[in-house]
Amino acid sequence: MPRKSFLLLLLGTLLTVSAAAQTVAEKARSYIDRFAPYAVLEMHRSAVPASITLAQGMLESGYGLSRLSTEANNHFGIQCHKGWNGPSIKEMDNGELRCFRAYDSALESYRDHSDFLRGNRRYGPLFELKPTDYKGWAKGLSKCGYAEDRAYPEKLITLIETYDLRRFDKMSLAEAEKLLDKAPKTPVVKESKSEQKETAKERRRRIRREKKEQKLIKEGYEEILPEAPAELEAPKEVRQDDARVKFSLQRPLYSKGGVLFVYSIEEETYESIASAFNLFPKEILRFNDLKAAEPLQPGTIVYIEAKRSQAVKGLETHVVEPGETLRDIAQDFGVKEKALRKINGFSATYEPESGEMIRLRKP
């Protein structure tokens, strides 16, 4: 091949590669401009680093251009699972047609994603890390089983470092709100110029999405990041000088979600504990979501006052663990079982399955 022809061919190849790389960069920056404010807002609500959330959204939604994200606002590939009563969309995944969640807005998808991580005890150790430790989070997600792809951590880290997503991990709530005001309201960059024009259907969907997002944003976010879920769940020992204690303490007393309880000891019964705290037997059974007394194993949590109608702020959701019943969850979080059924729309006999995400607080 003549040298001149070879050089022209090489130049053409380099220009093609450069154009392709430029297109990817444009898609990435368009996605960041549009959705970075959501990642920061969710960081202030859930303590999931904004850089991690944004990188996951970019990777799993193909920069917001996948069918799941454009038609269902699902940026993280969250499947329906049992108990999902919202809208859905069918999509092929690993050769199988699966059910995925559909949302009215992208912010709902971002919120569901952070709720899934925060409500799943499998990912609990990640919340002990600093929110600026994006490498620890990326590697931790993989270690905790978030993705089967062994290269997943490096893919996240590469995106974070290539587009300097770390800057969002230090962003204040006020800065995020300013960023949100400047964010483009139109969809992310489309594949071709012929697709750039917004259709009437897309416009209706955008208006509906924006109204939903504004409603969620108005619910408010906190400037200070919430404590780790494990810290909020941990029982707190109650002292004699606590205003809630109206009697002389003869044994250690604790609280979960602000609700007083004791750990049962050998040979104790619900009736004997009720007597010790001047309660009627029926009262203590009601406090512990029981219709009839049952044998007490040492170390069992026994509430001595009525549980709450929802969990403490910061514990929004819980992913059901193997063998766990709804009453187990109610006892773990100091919430009435009846209240959990109402919050989640469960019938009186429904029991959630392992892996199902349930709400602990009112929406």
Image: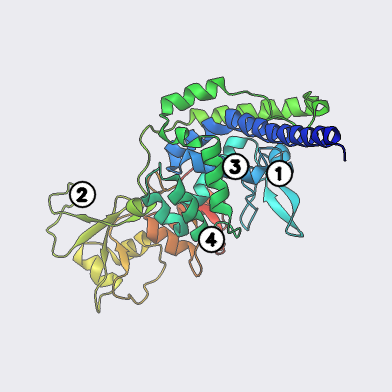
Query: Residue at position x 35%, y 65% from top?
Result: 285
Question: Counting other residues with Cα less than 10 Å from the Cα at mark 1, is it few (<14), some (14-19), or many (20 or more)?
Answer: many
Q: Is residue 242 left or right of residue 285?
A: left
Locate residue 102: give its quadrant. Answer: top right
Question: Which of the marked residues, 4 or 3, is nearer the chain's N terminus?
Answer: 3
Closer to the observer: label 3 or label 2?
3
Residue 244 spot, x, y in % from top left:
20, 49
Q: How many marks?
A: 4
Residue 359: tell me if it is visible. Answer: no
Q: Is residue 65 above or below residue 33?
A: below
Task: Indicate which disc residue 150 carries.
Answer: none
The crowd level at tag 2 (other Cα within 10 Å; few <14, some 14-19, many 20+) is few
Name the element at disc 1: helix
Q: Is residue 270 left or right of residue 12?
A: left
Dot 3: few (<14), some (14–19), or many (≥20) neighbours within 10 Å?
Answer: many
Task: Reply above or below: 173 against 250.
Answer: above
Residue 321 in the image: state x and y as whole percent. Answer: 49, 64
Of the numbered discs 1 and 3, the one sitting upstream in the chain is 3
Task: Provide the residue designation for mark 3.
Answer: 57
Dot 4: what SS?
loop
Q: Given the image, on which type of amino acid does mark 2 rest? A: Arg
In front of the other: 176 or 307: 176
At label 4, counting other C-alpha atoms closer than 10 Å, the crowd grade (few under 14, some 14-19, many 20 or more) is: few
Q: Which residue is mark 4?
A: 145
Looking at the rendered structure, the kind of residue marked 1 is Leu
Residue that carries the numbered disc 1 in the rendered image: 68
